[in-house]
Image (spheres, rainbow, N blue to C red):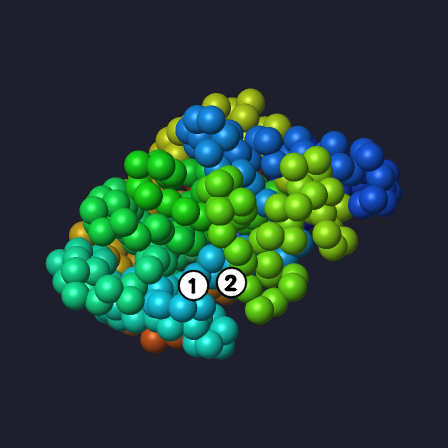
Amino acid sequence: MKRERLLNPGPVTLSPSVRTALQRPDLCHREKEFFDLTTSVIQRLEKVYANPGHAYRALVMTGSGTAAVEAMISSLAPKAGKTLVIANGVYGERAATMLSMQGKGHVVLKQEWTDAPDLRAIEDLLSKDSDIKKIFVVHHETTTGRLNDLASIGALAKKYKKPLLVDAVSSFGAEDVQLTEWNIEALAGAANKCLHGVPGIAFVLVKSEIFAAETTQSASLYFDLWQYAKGQGSGVSPFTQSVQAMNALDAALTEFDAAGGWKARHLRYKTLQVRVRTTLKELGIKDLLSDPESTSVVLAGFQIPAGKTYAALHSALKAKNFTVYAGQAKLEGEIFRISTMGDLHDSDIEELCTELRNALR
Ligand SMILES: *Cc1c(COP(=O)(O)O)cnc(C)c1O
């Protein structure tokens, strides 16, 4: 079988063990074996980051990463009062769209996509607008590769007592997350990014105490986390789950834990990214961000040099079984992005560097 090396931010190149897990025997989602599988997946998701006293529980649902974000916003963004949305990319803006469609109050701190969240502007809004009840922020803004500074935003959230709702879809499993320290109430993630599963399972980590203390803010049934909280303590889900995607996530988490968890994955991605970056630097290719040290280890954006086009770069690499990723919306045609997620070997990256030299010299 042809091996496609995916350098886009999910879905990722599968490892042999994850691919094999897709061939497990058929299983009904209402059988004990599936409840046990779900429980095991949930328990491992809850342990990816320090979670003393089971302060956070994981809820799993069938859908892409956006489903997890939508479930979090639907269930936890307040109907009365406002959510402050920090938007410096496509995913921050998408959250604002969700709040508009749900008819919920919100204030958007809309920034240039290439800029870091403006901490002074955030503090200004929090100190002046007492209607703001919660803050939404994207951890790794995949639009540009920027890792938003959650430690600083979390400190403001703590100071003003506003819970954080975090889109960690493209950082969960590869970047540091400090749940309690950063005042996180809930965090959305997905199987098919840094965890290396297949698309289909999404999850939300939520403060366990919420379910007893509060009521859902959701007008949707499927995206109501309270529906999932009821039975998932014993692995029972309200709606049909993608059994195959759950099997794949099970295998992916086994590999993830055996390799040393998020810290090991962080180092692995970083090593690969440094190799790609060094090559591009030698070729005179510029980083998208003016402060490249703020880039995640997961993905970096680079400027298309004068005289070259994204289309030509994409097809030259595609011919060698590498899939690079374009810029989104206003960055389309201006940049290309390279993610080092997935089961990529050292030899893949060496070959990629050679092909980048051939295409961009
Ligand atoms: C990939 C991604 C999502 C989810 O996108 P889907 O297409 O629904 O999987 C959400 N947020 C961020 C930051 C992402 O990178």
Q: Position of residue 196 (x, y in %)?
A: 56, 41
Can you tell which mark lies on residue 272? none
Q: Residues within 10 Å of mark 2 (few under 14, many from 20)?
A: some
Q: What element carries label 1?
A: loop
Q: Quadrant of the C terminus?
A: bottom left
Disc 2 marks which amino acid?
Answer: Gln
x 21%, y 60%: residue: 126
Spatial distance from mark 2 to mark 1, Cα to Cα? 6 Å
Sequence-wise, the earlier of marks 2 and 1 is 1
Q: Position of residue 304 (x, y in %)?
A: 31, 65
Residue annotated with mark 2: 217
Q: Is residue 298 left or right of residue 84?
A: right
Residue annotated with mark 1: 78
Q: In this view, does 9 lie to the left or right of 243?
A: left
- Please name whichever residue, 62 or 220, is drawn nearer the observer in this view of the structure: 220
Q: Position of residue 176 (x, y in %)?
A: 35, 36
x 69%, y 43%: residue: 231
**In this view, 167 is above or below 48:** below
Quadrant in which residue 270 is drawn: top left
Q: Can residue 241 be seen in this view?
A: yes
- Please name whichever residue, 3 or 115, is drawn nearer the observer in this view of the structure: 115
Q: Is mark 2 on a helix, strand or loop?
A: loop
- Marks 2,1: beta carbons within 8 A: yes
Q: Where is residue 245 in the image (x, y as percent from the top left)?
A: 69, 46
